[in-house]
Image: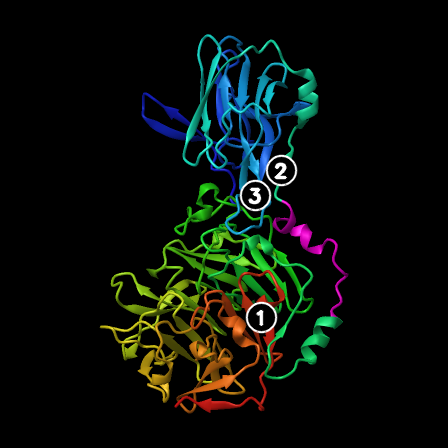
Amino acid sequence: MITSNGTWVYSIAANQWRKLELKTEPSPRALSPMAFDKATGKIVLFGGDLLDGVAGDTWAYDCKTRVWVEQKPALGPAPRFGHVLLPIPQLPGKVLLAGGSTVTSSTAYQASLYQPLPFELWVYDIAENRWDLLKRFEKEALVPKSVPNNSNLAAIDDASHLLFVGAGKKRYESATLVLELDASRLDQAGTKEFGVPTGTVTYRTGPYDPEWYSQDVPAVDRTQPAKILASLVPNRWTQLKPPKWPQNRQGGGWSTVAYDTDRQQFLHLGGGHSSYFGNDVAHYDTLTDRWSISGRPQFALQYNYDLSGPGAWAFNSGPWGNHNYHAYQYDSTRQRLVYVRNTYTHFYDPVSRTWKHDELIRDNPFTGSKYTTYLVSTPTGVVAWANEKRDGFRHGIYRLSKSGWHKLATTGEALPKSETDGSTITFDSKRKQLLLTTSLGEKGITHSGQVWAVDLATGEVKKLSPAGQQKTVVKRFGRESVFLPKRDSVMIGYHLGWSEGKKNRVPFYDVAGNRWLVADLPESQFFSRQGEGASVDLGLIYDAPRDLVWAVMCRLQSPQDLQVIRLDERLSMAPLE
């Protein structure tokens, strides 16, 4: 958990900021304005966006004693952020609050996660520690709305005229309000009706609330999931039906899933298409058939519909989600979820369900990219296939140890380039090697179907040119893969022959035979929701103790998004010829 960045003072004469070492300060928050009252020499702060909720607390900072005190009036405005706070020139010792926004709990695709509150004016008496409603505008059309995910502008002149600039009726349009304030006509009845107890916090509800996942559901019965897995029809996908889903992901994916082998649970980080920057981690417990989330997700205000995303992490130390492709995996040696985002490597503890900011790696030795950095779990730690920093056209293999990332010195063939949603990285546990595939070639030549082997002991790279690779030539090959030790093969989360109506043909790479095979797996059409090669939502997991393959569609909304299969010796795989 990241604590507050602190209280800073600025010297105009020295042109210098200086941090104050204070015992008590407001918690971190965003869009929480402050107002200085000259008569009392105090700065008033109210509310703000906590990123996972909206605050309704009142603080006063004494500029003489340099002490923050949380004021606790009986009632105050409803929690809000993006409002304005202004001193009232004609009323020394009092400040005005105008406007403000709150959050929504919508789970619709590209949902609006913020909304303006009814426009209100409140007056705070510093000496009396009292909030009073001045006026509430509910039906007056000329009153501008607060900008739902940003700050508003306002000023008061010496004649107590309020100028407020907010959102207009159309997108990107502003509207201006001018009012003559009469702070002597306080609305005592309205204060009681619309005021809330001090310190109230507004949170998102439903799937955004960790407690929601255990409410109004049957008691956990650990025997039932075990019975379902024991009775699977071999070589056919079976849908699982947990009672609740993490529907806060808002209907998209572009992400993988990691397997916490120590607790037999899946970990999912990320969300919908350009729409979800919540930083909660979704957990699926395979022993109880239950989803849950790590905590209330923190959101990054106006970045919720932006592919680039906000800064590196939030107030809770958690990195922002969104599309994470294959940039995170579970590390059994650290017992952490490892997530590469830009120059940072983040670590998540699935037991405490917190991001470990003190373990953060701040400067990766490779060019971290959620699009093209591919991670894979091995018994000795996570391995990354990523662009080299000094040469963006070259790739390297990097191993994560307790001391950080270390590049593997390779010999032989040049490593291929990874491609967004079009490459796979698989750990071959029998030979202690990596197997790589990619769609990205040089000079118009596709590499789909080609396989590279990387010996993790010697660093030797071999291009294997398997038989049947010409039958897998497509624009973009698969992204998800699992090694099946009992069959000594790699299963690719992809379809071959979709355009010919063959929606269940799944490719397998026969490692010992160095050849491509294909098998018909009934009900596997859920791999690709849009057509051949479009497996952007799929995550594949091999469950070694139970010899199962799990598939998670990262929309996380319905039974087809969580499936499992047991592959046995009766599965017929034919060479691709």
- Indicate the position of residue 149 as horizontal and vertical percent values: 48, 37
As for residue 397 lying within the magenta part, the answer is no
Look at the numbered disc 3 and give the secondary structure of its residue: loop
Relative to 152, is 519 above or below? Answer: below
Q: Which residue is mark 2?
A: 202
Q: What is the CA distance from the residue labelled 1 to the residue labelled 3?
A: 29 Å
Q: What is the CA distance from the residue labelled 1 to the residue labelled 2?
A: 36 Å
Q: Which residue is located at x 41 percent, y 35 percent?
A: 172
Q: Nearer the viewer, mark 1 or mark 3?
A: 3
Kind of residue at disc 3: Asp
Between discs 1 and 3, the one toward the N terminus? 3
Query: Residue 421 is drawn in which quadrant?
Result: bottom left
Residue 130 visible in this rendered orientation of the protein: no
- Indicate the position of residue 94 as horizontal and vertical percent values: 55, 14
Q: Which residues are magenta?
A: 205-222
Q: How is the image coloured?
A: rainbow
Q: Which residue is mark 1?
A: 261
